[in-house]
Image (cartoon, rainbow, N blue to C red):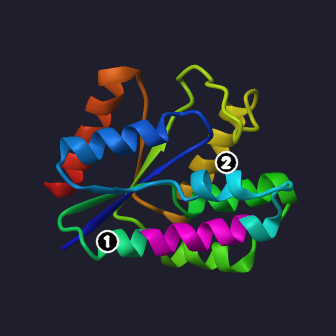
């Protein structure tokens, strides 16, 4: 049976790197972050509608990759990201994202702690409040009672911590 693991958390907390490293370590697939291909194509500022389109695109890609994956699937982002992103930037979350956040539950959420140095990127917006945002992620996962673990540390230590959480899920 396929176990889906969401890599989630604020910007610049190593989600993409961790998803790549975990997929390589466990010899399985990962779902890349859809917004990375979507946002650069816009010739305007993104809207709440774009966040909804990103969430739908992410899910579509996840289902496509899941169809050809056995064992573990690592997802570089999840509905927690689009939910909090919409709430922080626009003050509200599209209902469809809220519904998916509650219904599309992952077997494990790896919540990345913001203990890595900020890395500038044209798509990133929040260099100074990652700790506050981390609190929003933690609260959202706790309120729903989702199975999550906080991943911290740098480099090999961060990967080792994440691997231990995944192996606990499989035990």
Q: Nearer the viewer, mark 2 or mark 1?
A: 1
**Label whose residue precedes the other's in the sequence (2 or 1):** 1
Q: Tag 2, which secondary structure?
A: helix
Q: Nearer the viewer, residue 58 or 114?
A: 58
Q: Main secondary structure of the magenta part?
A: helix
Which residue has dot 1 on it?
Answer: 66
Q: Nearer the viewer, residue 144 or 47?
A: 47
The residue located at (46%, 42%) in the rendering is 16
Residue at figure coordinates x 62%, y 23% from the top left: 118
- Image quadrant containing the C terminus: bottom left
Which residue in the structure is indicated by mark 2?
136
Residue 111's x, y, as percent?
48, 44
At 48% from the left and 75% from the top, the residue drawn is 60
Residue 111: which numbered mark, if any?
Answer: none
- Residue 107 lies, with reference to residue 125, above or below; the image says below
Can you give x and y, in whole percent of width and height, for residue 163 in the image? 25, 39
In which quadrant of the rendered image does the N terminus lie?
bottom left
Quick check: 129 left or right of 102? right
Residue 6 lies, in percent from the top left, at 42, 56
Figure check: 81 above or below 111: below
Q: Is residue 52 magenta?
A: yes
The magenta segment is 51-61
């Amino acid at each position: 049976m396929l176990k889906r693991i969401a890599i989630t958390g604020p910007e610049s907390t190593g989600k993409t790197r961790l998803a790549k490293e975990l997929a390589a370590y466990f010899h399985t697939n990962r779902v890349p972050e859809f917004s990375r291909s979507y946002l650069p194509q816009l010739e305007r500022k993104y809207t709440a509608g774009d966040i909804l389109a990103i969430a739908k695109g992410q899910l579509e890609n996840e289902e496509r990759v899941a169809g050809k994956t056995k064992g573990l699937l690592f997802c570089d982002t999840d509905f927690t990201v689009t939910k909090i992103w919409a709430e922080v930037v626009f003050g509200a979350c599209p209902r469809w994202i809220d519904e998916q956040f509650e219904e599309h539950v992952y077997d494990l959420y790896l919540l990345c702690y913001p203990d890595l140095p900020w890395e500038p990127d044209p798509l990133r917006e929040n260099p100074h409040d990652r700790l506050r945002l981390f609190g929003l992620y933690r609260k959202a996962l706790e309120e729903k009672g989702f199975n999550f673990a906080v991943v911290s540390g740098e480099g090999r230590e961060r990967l080792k911590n994440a691997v231990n959480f995944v192996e606990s899920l499989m035990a």
